Image (spheres, rainbow, N blue to C red):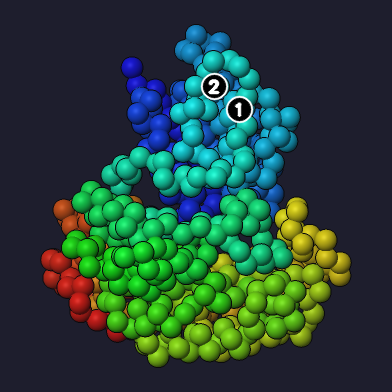
């Protein structure tokens, strides 16, 4: 009899990938996906530790799951296994078990390949399982082949961990040191995803452009070389990668943006601040002008490239002059999309011990000012596509009957009235209207768009 598995995923695309692989690992044990925690035999919270109050959100969800677990046992419907994985588990493993004794398993993001052993131990009623040690072996060497993707786009993890140690970031402590998978393993997984229907693959890593895996003949490749290699896979029409560090944008990667048509002209390149003083306090290892020069080189290589970025306002010690420098950088570069946040201290990071804390009122004012400027830029970028013919990869149904929705090369949602038979296809569409959260269009040619055809903004 099949057992039902529900995984709630918090945070980044890496966690989305990890959740899918957890399901792959548990499938041989008879677990099939459940639509909700109600009635599930196992519930996994795959957690993220980046945002403020991330741990408290997990504990709140665990309180709700405690009641579901009690009700399931009281009804005689068997036991519910509750597990907490991911970065909060890595950072607060023992604390989770102390505060939520109904949790059966706690495991870090590098150990989920051992889930079958954990499940066996937990179901023997021998006590809760805690597995947050960084293993000697990499999990990728022990994961089964990935299951079929759920749509036309798929994630593929190529790199994990980070050696940059930005003072505000918990990733080096929860994901560990940088690790790059071999090119052959990445290619094999990419080919399986394409064979199962994926037309777009996003290469994932905490610092993905630091990837330096073993390539053909044992030589070391960098990300640009890997992208050129993957672009040779028949049936793969789009390649993306995220998230990047400005220090690791090398010549080969810039060249790939100029020569690999399957590499989409949209890059998420976090800068965090426009102030050199604050960037140094963040240990970003680059200055504002370094970032500008990198953007200039990318735009020379691929003139239609659009950028998104991350910004933190109110970092300890940030002055009005520092914030003004951020506004100047944003105004000078122009962004198609961004994520911006008020600084919040992550326990255990160097920035958490910094003094000269910026008052919340000032943080709020600066965030509002920054987001207004960024919002104007994003809206202008979307308006620039009005009337343009764009290749759209359709991914599924729209909200209304007869609609399907897809993505432009610049990650914009595009809605058209067309048959669902086009889901999984790249089709040319003329943009007819700019909506609040998406573009609306009409079909031009109901067929494959040639991957070699360059599309200009």
Secondary structure category for the residue under label 2: helix
Residue at the spot 69% in from the left edge and 77% down from the top edge: 279
Graded by Cα atoms within 10 Å as few (under 14), some (14 to 19) or many (20 or more), the crowding at tag 2 reads some
Residue 405 is at least partly visible in this image: no
**How many dots with numbers?**
2
Q: Earlier in the sequence, mark 2 or mark 1?
A: 2
Image side of residue 427 versus residue 105, left or right: left
Image side of residue 95 versus residue 382, left or right: right
Q: Position of residue 78 (x, y in %)?
A: 48, 13
Q: Is residue 153 above or below residue 4?
A: below
Residue at the spot 67% in from the left edge and 45% down from the top edge: 91
Mark number, residue 121: 2
Residue 298 is at least partly visible in this image: yes
Residue at the spot 52% in from the left edge and 75% down from the top edge: 248
Quadrant the N terminus occupies: top left
Residue at the spot 63% in from the left edge and 20% down from the top edge: 127
Mark number, residue 90: none
Quadrant the C terminus occupies: bottom left
Image side of residue 114 versus residue 363, left or right: left
What residue is shown with label 1?
A: 129
Q: Position of residue 335 (x, y in %)?
A: 50, 79
Asked if the residues shown at circle 2 and circle 1 are in contact, with their CB atoms under 8 angstroms apart, the answer is yes
Q: Position of residue 343 (x, y in %)?
A: 72, 64
As measured in the structure, the alpha-carbon distance from the residue carrying label 2 to the one carrying label 1 is: 7 Å
Front residue of 261 and 208: 208
Q: Position of residue 325 (x, y in %)?
A: 69, 85
Image side of residue 201 versus residue 167, left or right: left
Graded by Cα atoms within 10 Å as few (under 14), some (14 to 19) or many (20 or more), the crowding at tag 1 reads many
Q: Which of the 4 quarters of the picture holds residue 384? A: bottom left
- Toward the front, the furthest residue is 217
Q: Is residue 244 above or below residue 57?
A: below
Secondary structure category for the residue under label 1: strand
């Amino acid at each position: 009899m099949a057992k039902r598995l529900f995984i709630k995923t918090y945070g980044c695309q890496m966690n989305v990938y990890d959740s899918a692989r957890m399901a792959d690992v548990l499938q041989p044990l008879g677990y099939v996906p459940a639509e909700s925690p109600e009635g599930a035999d196992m519930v996994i919270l795959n957690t993220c530790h980046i945002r403020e109050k991330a741990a408290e959100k997990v504990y709140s969800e665990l309180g709700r799951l405690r009641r579901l677990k009690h009700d399931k046992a009281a009804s005689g419907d068997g036991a519910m296994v509750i597990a907490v994985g991911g970065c909060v588990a890595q950072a607060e493993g023992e604390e989770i078990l102390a505060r939520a004794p109904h949790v059966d398993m706690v495991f870090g993001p590098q150990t989920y390949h051992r889930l079958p052993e954990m499940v066996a131990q937990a179901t023997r009623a021998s006590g809760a399982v805690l597995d947050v040690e960084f293993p000697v072996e990499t999990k990728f060497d022990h994961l089964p082949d990935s299951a079929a993707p759920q749509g036309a786009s798929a994630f593929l993890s190529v790199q994990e961990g980070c050696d940059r140690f930005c003072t505000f970031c918990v990733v080096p402590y929860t994901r560990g040191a940088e690790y790059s998978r071999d090119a052959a393993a990445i290619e094999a997984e990419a080919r399986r995803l394409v064979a199962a229907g994926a037309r777009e693959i996003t290469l994932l890593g905490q610092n993905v452009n630091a990837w330096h895996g073993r390539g053909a003949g044992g030589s070391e490749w960098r990300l640009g070389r890997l992208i050129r290699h993957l672009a040779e896979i028949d049936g793969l029409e789009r390649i993306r990668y995220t998230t990047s560090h400005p220090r690791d944008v090398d010549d080969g990667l810039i060249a790939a943006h100029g020569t690999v048509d399957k590499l989409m002209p949209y890059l998420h390149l976090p800068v965090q601040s426009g102030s050199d003083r604050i960037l140094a306090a963040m240990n970003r290892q680059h200055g504002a002008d370094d970032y500008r020069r990198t953007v200039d080189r990318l735009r020379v290589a691929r003139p239609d490239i659009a950028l998104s970025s991350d910004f933190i306002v109110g970092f300890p010690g940030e002055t009005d002059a520092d914030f003004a420098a951020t506004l100047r950088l944003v105004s000078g570069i122009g962004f198609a999309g961004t994520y911006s946040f008020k600084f919040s201290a992550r326990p255990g990071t160097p920035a958490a011990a910094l003094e000269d804390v910026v008052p919340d009122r000032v943080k709020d004012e600066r965030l509002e000012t920054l987001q207004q400027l960024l919002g104007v830029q994003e809206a202008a970028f979307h308006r620039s596509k009005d009337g343009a013919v764009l290749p759209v990869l359709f991914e599924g149904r729209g909200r209304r009957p007869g609609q399907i929705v897809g993505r432009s090369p610049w990650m914009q949602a595009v809605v058209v009235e067309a048959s669902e038979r086009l889901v999984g296809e790249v089709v040319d569409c003329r943009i007819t209207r700019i909506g609040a959260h998406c573009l609306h269009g009409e079909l031009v040619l109901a067929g494959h768009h040639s991957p070699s055809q360059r599309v200009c903004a």
